[in-house]
Image: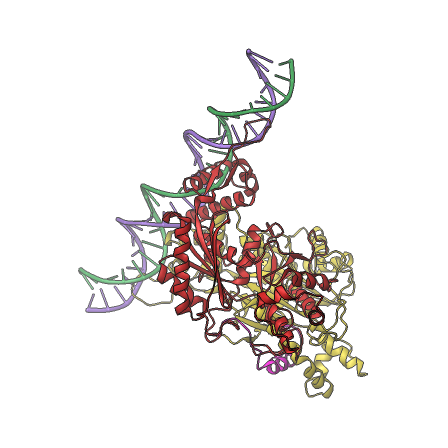
Chain colours: A yellow, B red, C purple, D green
Amino acid sequence: MMLSATNVVKAKLINRWLVFDTIRRESGIARAGIATSTGLSKQAISDLVDELIALGLIKESKSAERRVGKPPTPLCINPEGAYALGFHVDVGQMSAIVANLAGDVLCRRDQSLNDLEPERAVTELFAAAKALIREVKIPRDRFLGIGLATPGPFGVAGLSPPRLPGWDGLRLRTLLHEASGFPVSLSNDGQCATIAEWRFGDAARGLTHFVYVYFGIGMGSGVMINSAIFGGASGNAGELGHLTVVPGGHECICGKRGCLETYVSVDAAIRHLSAEGIEVASPAAFAATFDDSHPLISSWIGAGVEPFRNALNALENLFDPQTIMIGGNAPDWLIEVFMAKAEPLLPSVGRIERTLPRIIRSDLGVDAVVRGAAVLPLLTTLNPQYRELNPHA
Amino acid sequence: MMLSATNVVKAKLINRWLVFDTIRRESGIARAGIATSTGLSKQAISDLVDELIALGLIKESKSAERRVGKPPTPLCINPEGAYALGFHVDVGQMSAIVANLAGDVLCRRDQSLNDLEPERAVTELFAAAKALIREVKIPRDRFLGIGLATPGPFGVAGLSPPRLPGWDGLRLRTLLHEASGFPVSLSNDGQCATIAEWRFGDAARGLTHFVYVYFGIGMGSGVMINSAIFGGASGNAGELGHLTVVPGGHECICGKRGCLETYVSVDAAIRHLSAEGIEVASPAAFAATFDDSHPLISSWIGAGVEPFRNALNALENLFDPQTIMIGGNAPDWLIEVFMAKAEPLLPSVGRIERTLPRIIRSDLGVDAVVRGAAVLPLLTTLNPQYRELNPHA
DNA sequence: AATAATTAATCCGTCATACTGACTTACTAA
DNA sequence: TTAGTAAGTCAGTATGACGGATTAATTATT
């Protein structure tokens, strides 16, 4: 991270976040334990804990331990301490949730979204937001804001997400903020899913460097570096789907040929079937109707395995992650077939002594994106590092 | 970056580094200017500047400006304030320099290195170090230590740099430290070159996110993220040479097929000539004897252009850098031919509104690696962020 | 030449925060 | 009942950034 000038006050915010996040990761830890694990003094921890309690973000619980000495006072997140909305806007549909501070999904709403113009979509989003807030009866002063996940790239004049022509996440963000008056944080879908897996998943919890491969309609990824989401210079890092895996191969909407996404993605499967005369109405219909026993699917998968394996190898060689996690809203059977067939993985650099498998399955289901989106307002509010690394978000 | 607990003292070290680096980047800046550009108060800057002067790392110079008001006191790096050695160990040869705090090369020594066993190479390295230190008459208390650049990967049990079987940078580092008693910082060659370009080059100075492609005997890269070198989970990120660019293509020493390095690298060129019956004794002989007018070279280049273009595109899509800088110890003509033929570049995500070209030529020549290595001890000594991100270094 | 304006840099008192060591609290073990 | 132990708090200290006033060194104006 770019170093920036610090003073006591900024340093304190960092420490406060650190204490909060330690309690989140290790629920039930006591003040003394936090002091040990962070290296700060008992006293400093005590003060910060008191402040977080006063803010309502954490709470004490009764000690259950029976040991020599004064029993510790276990601390945990106060789920009712804060609330946020998460939106996941994708081609033709939108999901929205209310999440509490613990990340529990309290309420959700899915609806189709036919107006793909941000100017018109925003009214539907705002209506959904109002309805959700009313439904959960969120106290106004406990509401942190809205987290918005859309397909990338954004901030790229003249270049829209390939499947959402005319779309611009940044404009939607501005419009939604103006319409609602709430703070709106934005990130792309792959990055949101990565954040969710890192916070809520069992497998990725506590990892500091990993890549999350988002296998969905298209193919994206999220990169976690040193426990922070890596967005690149313009927030669009990790565009795995447009890695060239078959030189001179299928044409891609991005203008190139042979992109991974044209071989390995739900969209690619549907196109393949279509080329063979079988029309599939939607990704959902695809998931419900087909599986890998279908000969056309089976041959399609066969053609995608080598590209997929090479893409994973590229991620290992370029990012040197602790592991690669694979998830997304593609059907489970599809993701699992690709993971199985990707073995044996190609050799790569990176550490040989691994405690983790080189590829692991994601823990969270299709909710990952929207749950990750609902984390963004918290990061914006409380994590000074996130604010610094994502000034646009 | 992983956040870690901070206190006033650590915060001060960050600020001190920031002040030092600001003076390095903008030589001649005065206290008031540093205050403006860092956001710290005049007073804080004044104190930190005084401390850096007392340490001998910076010095005041006479003001030349004629303006209204008290003339500023320009500050600049004190080149004699500190010294470091830089070593670049590569296949069969070693370069070593003494650099002062300004990064000026005061003295150098190149020699062949036949013993590729770290255990035996270390005696030659230490002898070179002693000779250089004596030659420049470095005051002992101004000597920061040795920076060591070797080909990666390291820290990978059972996996050596492909062209240096049995080699292990980490072991060499330990041995050299034990033999010399000096602190030894280690990084791989691509990362060192990246650091050098970022500090000493005109084109990369001040960039925060970029990728440096190291076109040499092999093909490596260095990734700068948020003004910090990105090493990945095990320090081996950026292994561009082993990106699969031609599925089922040439066999590579890494065990795969179709790696970029087997198409685009000096080694690949020499192998190509060899396959056509022309033996080339060394990379130097190659550079001296051939150019792109040679029909075999010309056809070899033709076959490499598409793989190279795809590799650049992969870097853009995955890292979303501000720009990609291309350099290395391959002959200039070769690098320039590839850069020219890579155009037009393939479409990628990442910002369209660019102030920089998508690819730029490196500023520094073959010295980049060893000069970057000589920066490592300074980073280890003075930059708290570097220490935190590179505990092994 | 005197004075005003301007900018750089320092002086000095204040403030926020982490640290240290002593102390208190609440428990178990003997 | 007493000793031992670990958690947590209290009170005082140290560090370092901040802010406003002051000093310093120069040009511009009259």
| Foreground of the two, A133 or B121 | B121
Picture residue at 50% right of the left edge, 35% below the top:
B61
Query: Please, is residue A45 above or below residue A215 in the view?
Result: above
Picture residue at 66% right of the left edge, 69% below the top:
A240
| Residue B88 shows in this picture | no
Q: Give the magenta part as a residue range.
A: A326-354
Decide whether residue A349 is among the magenta residues: yes
Residue B337, given in percent of the width and then of the height, sits at 69, 62
Q: Quadrant of residue B318?
A: bottom right
| Foreground of the two, B379 or A319 | B379
Residue B139, given in percent of the width and then of the height, sits at 38, 47
| Foreground of the two, A358 or B215 | B215
Decide whether residue B67 is among the magenta residues: no
Q: Is residue B241 left or right of residue B234?
A: right
Query: Please, is residue B138 above or below residue B87 in the view?
Result: above
Query: Please, is residue B328 above or below residue B33 in the view?
Result: below
Q: Is residue B137 left or right of residue B322?
A: left
Query: Please, is residue A179 above or below residue A37 in the view?
Result: above
**Residue reaching furthest to the right:** A277
Residue B62, given in percent of the width and then of the height, sits at 51, 32
Image quarter of the C terminus of chain A:
bottom right
Image quarter of the N terminus of chain A:
bottom right
Task: Report the number of discs.
Answer: 0
| Residue B90 shows in this picture | yes
| Foreground of the two, B347 or B342 | B342
Q: Quadrant of residue A341?
A: bottom right
Residue B101, given in percent of the width and then of the height, sits at 47, 47
Q: Is residue A270 left or right of residue A326?
A: right
